[in-house]
């Protein structure tokens, strides 16, 4: 565990493995432990798991504005710079997927070539309808106020009862208890402000920008999560180099409900990317090789 100072706050970052860098971004109420079950499968990569601001062991500032998308992306770029990561694959789940999308767009604009690949699990590109987007922002602000007023346990009870997570009821009791413990360990102020700052209602819709991401993209969704299956198709139609992987017997949290399948899908995609880069490198070397006859 390492708390890294970046842009006036400290974020908890845990690294593991050795190889090409893979940045891991959890969903709302999650944290670094989200990825524990998968690290052995990803041991040939240098995984960089971050507790986003307001979560886990990272700082929980009192100003909701500090949790916004631009600040969050700047924090992640700062972490990559601090760790000396020049090229990176990014994996994000749900809220972390939306952050990953914005990070990918930032890198496409400011650091072309730094993004090796992008993996989005159960991710939305944003709400296109302005009225719906405003309504969601108000709803999330009201929910944040209940976290501050009623405390973390009351909120977690409400959060776990959402229809979005209904398929998690079939998980082993030990898994559900571990997940609940992780959620309860969060700070109420941090969660409330993260909900405000990273609300999908506060996010501009990204559909028109997706064409700028020229890195390969893998979209992972659960077969029983109809809303996000449709969103994945919507994004794949606009991303230049994307494919969708639908996992059976899974809902919103594929990494949790089908961890072995999820981990193998991520590893396979990244290995394909590495092999493709190696072939491209060999082709460049062969093309650039001098012909001895030309030197005669």
Image (cartoon, rainbow, N blue to C red):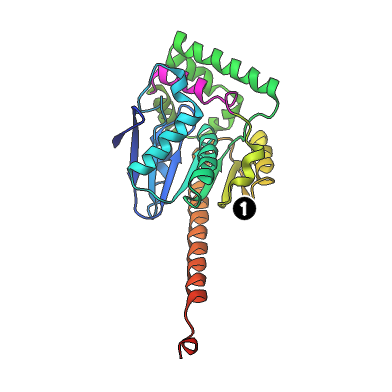
Q: Residue 184 versus residue 215: which sits nearer the camera?
A: 215
Q: Residue 53 versus residue 255: which sits nearer the camera?
A: 53
Taking 214 as reference, is 75 left or right?
left
Residue 135: % across, % down: 65, 17
Residue 200 shown in magenta: yes
Asked whether residue 246 is in view, the answer is: no
Q: Residue 157 versus residue 197: which sits nearer the camera?
A: 197
Q: Which residue lies furthest to the left in this view?
A: 2
Q: Residue 69 versus residue 127: which sits nearer the camera?
A: 69
Asked whether residue 239 is in view, the answer is: yes
Task: Tell me the quarter of the image containing the N terminus.
Answer: top left
Give the residue drawn at x 70%, y 20%: 131
Q: Pointer 1: what residue?
A: 241
Residue 273: % across, % down: 51, 58
Count of all numbered marks drawn on residues in the image: 1
Give the residue drawn at x 64%, y 19%: 134
Magenta residues, start to end:
186-203
The quadrant holding residue 83 is top left
Give the residue drawn at x 64%, y 36%: 228
Residue 14 shown in magenta: no
């Amino acid at each position: 565990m390492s708390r890294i100072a970046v842009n006036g706050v400290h974020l908890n970052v845990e690294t593991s493995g050795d190889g090409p860098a893979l940045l891991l971004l959890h969903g709302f109420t999650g944290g670094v432990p989200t990825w524990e079950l998968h690290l052995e499968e990803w041991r040939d990569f240098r995984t960089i798991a971050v507790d986003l601001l307001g979560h886990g062991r990272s700082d929980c500032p009192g100003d909701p504005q500090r949790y916004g998308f631009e600040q969050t992306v700047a924090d992640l770029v700062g972490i990559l710079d601090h760790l000396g990561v020049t090229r990176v694959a990014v994996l994000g789940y749900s809220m972390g997927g939306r952050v990953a999308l914005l990070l990918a767009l930032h890198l496409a604009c400011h650091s072309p070539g730094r993004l090796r690949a992008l993996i989005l699990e159960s991710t939305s590109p944003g709400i296109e309808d302005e009225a719906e987007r405003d309504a969601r922002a108000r709803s999330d602000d009201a929910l944040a106020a209940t976290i501050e007023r009623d405390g973390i346990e009351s909120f977690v009870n409400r959060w776990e009862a959402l229809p979005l997570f209904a398929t998690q009821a079939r998980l082993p009791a030990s898994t559900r208890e571990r997940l609940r413990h992780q959620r309860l360990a969060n700070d109420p102020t941090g969660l409330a402000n993260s909900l405000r700052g990273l609300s999908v209602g506060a996010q501009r819709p990204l559909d028109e920008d997706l064409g700028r991401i020229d890195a390969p993209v893998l979209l992972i969704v659960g077969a029983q999560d109809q809303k996000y299956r449709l969103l994945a198709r919507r994004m794949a139609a606009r991303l230049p180099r994307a494919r969708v992987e639908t996992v059976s017997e899974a809902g919103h949290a594929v990494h949790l409900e089908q961890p072995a399948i999820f981990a193998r899908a991520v590893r396979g995609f990244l290995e394909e990317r590495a092999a493709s880069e190696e072939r491209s490198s060999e082709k460049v070397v062969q093309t650039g090789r001098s012909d001895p006859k030309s030197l005669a």
